Amino acid sequence: MLVLVGTCMVIGDGILTPAISVLSASGGIKVDHPHMSNGVVVLVAVVILVGLFSLQHYGTDRVGWLFAPIVLLWFLLIGGIGMLNIWKYDSSVLKAFSPVYIYRYFRRGGRDGWTSLGGIMLSITGTEALFADLAHFPVSAIQIAFTVVVFPCLLLAYSGQAAYLMNHQDHVVDAFYRSIPDSIYWPVFIVATAAAIVASQATISATFSIIKQALALGCFPRVKVVHTSKKFLGQIYIPDINWILMILCIAVTAGFKNQSQIGNAYGTAVVIVMLATTLLMTLIMILVWRCHWILVLIFTALSLVVECTYFSAVLFKVDQGGWVPLVIAAAFLVIMYVWHYGTVKRYEFEMHSKVSMAWILGLGPSLGLVRVPGIGLVYTELASGVPHIFSHFITNLPAIHSVVVFVCVKYLPVYTVPEEERFLVKRIGPKNFHMFRCVARYGYKDLHKKDENFEKKLFDSLFLFVRLEAMMEGCSDSDEYSLYGQQTLQSTDGLLNNNGNSTSSNQDLTMSSVDSIVPVKSPLHVNSTVMSSSQMSSHTETDELEFLNSCRDAGVVHILGNTVVRASRGSKFYKKIAIDYIYAFLRKICRENSVIFNVPHESLLNVGQIFYV
């Protein structure tokens, strides 16, 4: 729940950041044209937002090289302007670096001084996403950039505005733009607008990224994910989320009466993200890094003192716009939690109701059915066992293809799965059953739809398994083997070629029995007994490969299971609403399995069943 809350707040951050950044930049027009109405400023901001979201499908690959120079120029400009204002107006503001003034400020301001922290919070927003780009930059790069450029430039900028306000207290609303010298006003305005767009792009991209990872872990409804760059795997575009973000951004921009309300909403989202991050970081330090408890205590105490202080101040702003991220996060939290709950229940049902191997063996080689020519690819979420949907299918339609392959596509919690380790092939039952399992594994950044030749790669792995199994006969007592793809391309080609020259590789192959995966030597390393056994089985191997090829030529049918989840009659009303309405609606509007698995429509067969929770 804590992770989901943090994730939903990051999504809220992705809505509020473009709104406040673009609106702040557009506000510079009004400073130069004081008679301009707020409506025109909002209209300009909305036009920029529409343009920004409309260009998302092109990705940032082509213009990404501009981002760093724009942001660097922006920081140098605000730092330089800050230095100029300190020198020009009042250098005594530098006394503010003394901690004594913090105490004096709170003593003098009382509750008003405390609640003002909700506005001061905006000066450190962005730090919650500081390390979001660790996938693209090393830690040292971010540390150096923040320490050498970002932090000092921000201190100079805010100190410069403070010096300016000492002499122009009536300009407090537009202090930044009014403190800019007239000679460079419009160049700074242009850079400020460009920097606002870059900042907005960063949070939009972060929102796409975190939703992609939530999707991979079954915590978000299935949506279309488009990779916009061939070089950088992290650059993605999610059309559905993009337009939802745009609508919500425009609603926030146009709906609030003033910018301070958006600032309150933004501050609330940021401080909750910080709190969630700190609490999760504590768990990481204890469970993953195994840090000493004293170090964990010091980190947690120092972080929570600062963040809880800001959080307590932000609570006073809830009725002044701070409720917006809470509502947005609550909506996404309901969606994500209900989807995850329904998905887990569906998976548990399939796990507990899967068909036993004894039942399959009891049917005999023909499975008690008519075996028709062709190959049936049965898609399932189970990585082991025979899914209940299969028994449901053959009970109602007593015919099945000559070869049955249970295909399981799994997204693993790793960055990427190498191509040569993509498929895990296993035989189910005796050879004359002609039943196999193939697990296709993908990481966070892998895109299943990129595999245009998915079916071809699957069959290549299947044929490779049959050849390897024939060579390994006599090495294991198990009738069930697995191929854990760690062969080089050369060894794979050697095993797949038609002339059977499969003993030309010195590569160590990895085989797996039902219970464990153990490394075994390549054919050149095994003893003569095994080689003899392999030669004796070559005839059987050739027959099976010919049989598989003939079945493939006869046609391939993709069989998808569609388990409909319903709330049982005795369920509480909120569970019925969650399952029968919210989850059912999400299942209806999200992408079909056939689209995700890239299944051709003309060879698709859907098999449905109802499950009550």
Image (cartoon, rainbow, N blue to C red):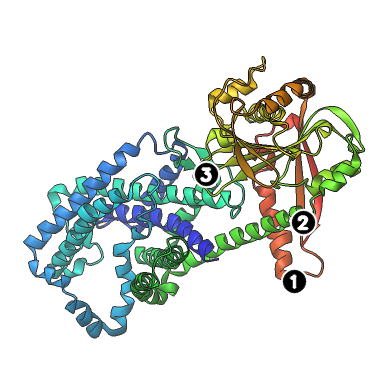
**From this viewpoint, which residue is outermost toward the top?**
499
Note whether 25 is above or below 312 in the view shown. Answer: above
Kindly indicate the quadrant of the structure image that contains residue 508. Answer: top right
Of the residues tagged 2 and 1, which is closer to the observer?
A: 2
Image quadrant in which you'd find residue 457: top right
Q: CA distance from mark 3 to mark 2?
A: 34 Å
Residue 342: name its quadrant: bottom right
Residue at numbered disc 1:
572
**In the rendered view, would you say 356 is above or below 604?**
below
Question: Which one is earlier in the sequence, the residue at label 3 or at label 2?
Answer: 3
Quarter of the image with the C terminus is bottom right
Residue 137 % position (x, y): 34, 45
481 w.r.t. 468: above or below: below
Q: Identify which amino acid the numbered label 3 is placed on.
A: Ile
The reply to whether discs 3 and 2 touch (Cβ–Cβ < 8 Å) is: no
Q: Which residue sits at x=8%, y=64%?
A: 89
Q: Which residue is mark 2?
A: 352
Mark 2: few/some/many CA within 10 Å (<14, 14-19, 20+):
few
Q: Provide the secondary structure element on which disc 2 rests.
A: helix
Residue highlighted by disc 3: 238
